[in-house]
Amino acid sequence: MFFPSFRSMAWLGFFVTILLAWVWLYRMSVSMDLDLIGRPGAMGAAMRAMDPRMPMYMPMASFGPVFAMWAVMMAAMMLPTMVPTLRSYEDLMHSADGTRAGWFGVLTGYCAVWIGFAALIAAVQLALLFAGVIDMLGIARSTLVSAGLLIVVGAFQFSRAKEICHGVCHSPMMYFLGHWRTGFGGGLRMGLGLGAYCAGCCWGFMALGFVGGVMSLLWMGLATLFMVIEKLPQIGHRVTKPMGVVLILAGVGLGLHSILKGG
């Protein structure tokens, strides 16, 4: 009889978690009556028109549901980008004194950072909602705000901060070699450090959810795909600045269109 190894079970659980997160997001998106490109249907249009200051319970105007949504999105979008990092740690399990407990520590620390980021961006979303900058679906009410966000995120792709953070995310092995700690606790510390660099590298793509809608499956899918490509060893460093150019041009084009249309 075949019994899967502990390594196989660990990886299986990892990928099942990603799958379940995407299934949850898909069901939530459908429940909001959103199509695949983020445009609202009848229910979505009604949600966009809601005022969060109205005296009635609105889940997307409360921290708990918004935080839960972002936490699941972090699992769906960021865990796939961690595959090269976990594979690099596994290499050190053979050549150094890495352990499966340390592997889980790295994963735990990484997830802890992104859960913290989920709490932060959930608070930002609620602040923007009550300020009237975005609607109930997390979409910017002003085209100029969307254009400005695209330009800011695009410009960040050329910044020194992006270069440093991406360098660590792109080459996790170098980070491990320079910060090596053993056991679960050591893995946890390294995971926290890697997660912090990853958040510094990828925060802009999360913020772009306010352009197309934080529950847009198209935005989530494209952002996840690009962040995975950005971390691939062979081509990751070649796509960062071109994406910055694309985002800046998109922002400028959207802004000019809005101005010419009088919006």
Image (cartoon, rainbow, N blue to C red):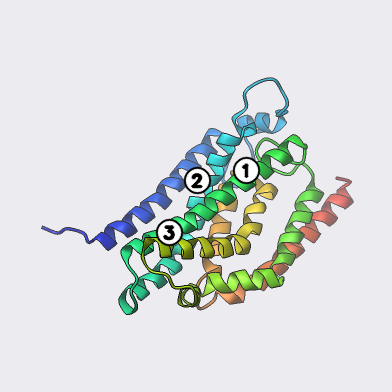
Q: CA distance from mark 2 to mark 1?
A: 12 Å
User: Where 237 falls versus 129 (above or below)?
Assistant: below
SS at mark 3 in the image: helix
Q: Amino acid at mark 1?
A: Ala
Residue 166 image offset from top left, x and y in percent: 59, 70
SS at mark 2 in the image: helix
Ranked by sequence position, the earlier of labels 3 and 1 is: 3
Q: Amino acid at mark 3?
A: Leu
The crowd level at tag 3 (other Cα within 10 Å; few <14, some 14-19, many 20+) is many
Of 66 and 236, which appears nearest the observer? 66
The answer to whether one can see residue 93 in this image is yes
In the image, which is nearer the foreground, mark 2 or mark 3? 3
Q: Which residue is mark 1?
A: 122
Q: Which residue is mark 3?
A: 107
User: Where 70 falls versus 56 (above or below)?
Assistant: below
Ranked by sequence position, the earlier of labels 2 and 3 is: 2
The crowd level at tag 2 (other Cα within 10 Å; few <14, some 14-19, many 20+) is many
Q: Quadrant of the N terminus?
A: bottom left
Residue 3 image offset from top left, x and y in percent: 17, 58
Left or right: where does residue 44 sit relative to residue 26?
Answer: right
Left or right: where does residue 128 sit relative to residue 227?
Answer: right
Q: Which residue is mark 2?
A: 72
